[in-house]
Image (cartoon, rainbow, N blue to C red):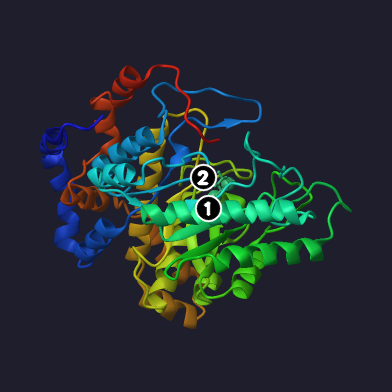
């Protein structure tokens, strides 16, 4: 379905007075309001194709209605999100869940929704029905060279799909590792993985990036071959300048200081991409900012600081993506909430008085340094984010309008009440 183009304008008109009242404080009192709004307008967060259906756990999956049945319908869903918030202007495809059959038609469809193709993702963590060799004991690390070759070939195939669509990056997330002590020779597993990644790297087009995503545990529970930022950084450094580390917020051990990790990787020029989600325990894949919004802000604080220190463009230098797949909410509502949470954290980070913060640090004024950060975090920046959306042509309150328009009901009418999206 396409949104009625007048629906957003009519809705915004009905909300305008209240919005302007809240915004007037910003436009009258805060000198940085305008540049922050402009940065927010530029900042786009890619939507992964696998987040458009209801997720599940290994105990079950309770599909919602009107889930997209094809790549075309997944793109239509991202098109809806982008029409509502003007901040979800890219889709990230997972191969083989989303293999395009007609590239031109898919590219045309993307253009009609103003969507770009973000990083493409390979999948060697599942066996596919027609696949010859199994990944049960790993893919790029496998003891059998034929399995490694099959996984390498798959990744190169994913690059070719991405090239045809205009993607500029390949994300490799490996489930490789071991479940029991003694199962794996760590040194050999690292070496084989590095060699395999090297072959994939060699097949990258000149202007592409390779993102090496790490994860501390699951599905392997004793060791993960790309288990932390240190090993990802090592692979990326050994591979070369087109290889970067990708940070997925849910892929750390509890209480890890992710903001410090981000700061160091950025400073080394090796942070490439980001997967946003939130968690209480592990890779929970909950809505960004739903559990630890202060942590999300602290991460953005380091991102803004580190990108500015290197003169990087906030919107285009790194790959920004949501990677969440929760079980109980309408996926589109969830994604609208995630994008908003990310924008709020970004806007708050832009508010931080960096000069005052540095002065407090140099003076060892710990309380003042904390005050400066918390002052930004406790500021209600929702009017700024809403204004950025309005100026870009989106809805002042995307979730409220989504509900008012009964979008889910319309999707169920179009697609049926019992549809299941490919993906997790
Ligand atoms: C993994 C990881 C990857 C994602 C898959 C679906 O846990 O986060 O980024 O592609 O899930
Ligand atoms: Mn991820
Ligand atoms: Mn994950």
Instruction: Measure the alpha-carbon separation of dots 1 and 2.
Output: 9 Å
| Mark sitting earlier along the chain (1/2) | 2
**Nearer the observer, 213 or 22:** 213
Q: Residues within 10 Å of mark 2 (few under 14, many from 20)?
A: many
Task: For ligand 1, tell me if the residue under mark 1 lies within 8 Å.
Answer: no
Vertically, is 410 above or below 149? above
Judged from this view, the residue extending furthest toward the bottom is: 362
Report the label total. Answer: 2
Counting from the top left corner in percent of width and height, residue 221 is at 76, 46
**Residue that appears at 58% across and 46% down:** 123
Task: For ligand 1, tell me if the residue under mark 2 lies within 8 Å.
Answer: no
**Residue that appears at 52% across and 79% down:** 364
**Residue that appears at 71% across and 45% down:** 135
Q: Mark 1 sits on what residue?
A: 157
Q: Residue 367 has which mark?
A: none
Counting from the top left corner in percent of width and height, residue 281 is at 63, 43
Judging from the image, what secondary structure is the residue with disc 2 in? loop
The reply to whether dot 1 and dot 2 touch (C-beta < 8 Å) is: yes
Q: Which of the 4 quarters of the picture holds residue 351?
A: bottom left
**Nearer the observer, 37 or 67:** 67
**Nearer the observer, 303 or 170:** 170
Q: Which of the 4 quarters of the picture holds residue 17?
A: top left
**Horizontal arrangement in the rendering, residue 339 relative to residue 108 (left or right):** right
**Residue that appears at 26% across and 29% down:** 1
Judged from this view, the residue extending furthest toward the right is: 182
**Horizontal arrangement in the rendering, residue 121 relative to residue 46 (left or right):** right
Q: Mark 2 sits on what residue?
A: 95
The answer to whether any part of residue 371 appears in the image is no
């Amino acid at each position: 379905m396409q949104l009625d183009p007048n629906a957003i304008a009519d809705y915004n008109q009905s909300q305008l007075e209240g919005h302007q009242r809240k915004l007037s404080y910003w436009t009258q009192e805060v000198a940085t309001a305008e540049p922050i709004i402009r940065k927010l307008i530029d900042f786009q967060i890619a939507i992964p194709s696998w987040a458009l259906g209801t997720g599940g756990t290994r105990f079950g999956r309770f599909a919602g209605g009107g889930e997209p049945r094809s790549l075309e319908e997944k793109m239509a869903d991202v098109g809806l999100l982008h029409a509502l918030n003007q901040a979800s202007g890219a889709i990230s495809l997972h191969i083989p869940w989303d293999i395009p059959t007609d590239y031109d038609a898919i590219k045309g469809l993307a253009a009609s929704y103003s969507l770009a193709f973000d990083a493409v993702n390979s999948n060697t963590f599942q066996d596919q029905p027609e696949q010859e060799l199994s990944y049960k004991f790993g893919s790029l690390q496998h003891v059998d060279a034929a399995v490694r070759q099959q996984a390498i070939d798959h990744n190169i195939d994913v690059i070719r799909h991405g090239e045809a669509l205009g993607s500029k990056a390949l994300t490799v997330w490996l489930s490789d590792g071991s479940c029991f002590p003694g199962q794996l020779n760590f040194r050999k597993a690292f070496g084989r993985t590095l060699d395999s990644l090297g072959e994939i790297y060699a097949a990258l087009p000149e202007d592409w990036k390779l993102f090496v995503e790490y994860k501390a545990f699951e599905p392997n529970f004793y060791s993960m071959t790309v288990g932390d930022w240190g090993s990802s950084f090592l692979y990326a450094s050994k591979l070369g300048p087109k290889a970067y580390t990708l940070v997925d917020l849910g892929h750390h051990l509890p209480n890890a200081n992710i903001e410090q990790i981000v700061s160091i990787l950025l400073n080394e020029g090796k942070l490439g991409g980001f997967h946003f989600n939130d968690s209480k325990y592990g890779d929970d894949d909950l809505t960004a900012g739903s559990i630890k919004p202060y942590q999300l802000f602290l991460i953005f604080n380091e991102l803004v600081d580190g990108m500015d220190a290197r003169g990087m463009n906030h919107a285009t230098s790194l790959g920004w993506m949501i990677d969440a797949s929760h079980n109980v909410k309408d996926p589109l509502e969830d994604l609208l909430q995630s994008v908003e949470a990310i924008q709020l954290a970004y806007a708050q980070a832009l508010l931080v008085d960096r000069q005052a913060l540095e002065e407090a640090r140099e003076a060892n004024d710990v309380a003042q340094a904390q005050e400066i950060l918390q002052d930004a975090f406790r500021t209600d920046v929702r009017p700024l984010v809403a204004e950025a959306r309005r100026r870009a042509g989106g809805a002042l309150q995307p979730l409220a309008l989504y509900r008012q328009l009964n979008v889910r009901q319309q999707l169920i009418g179009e697609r049926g009440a019992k549809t299941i999206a490919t993906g997790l």
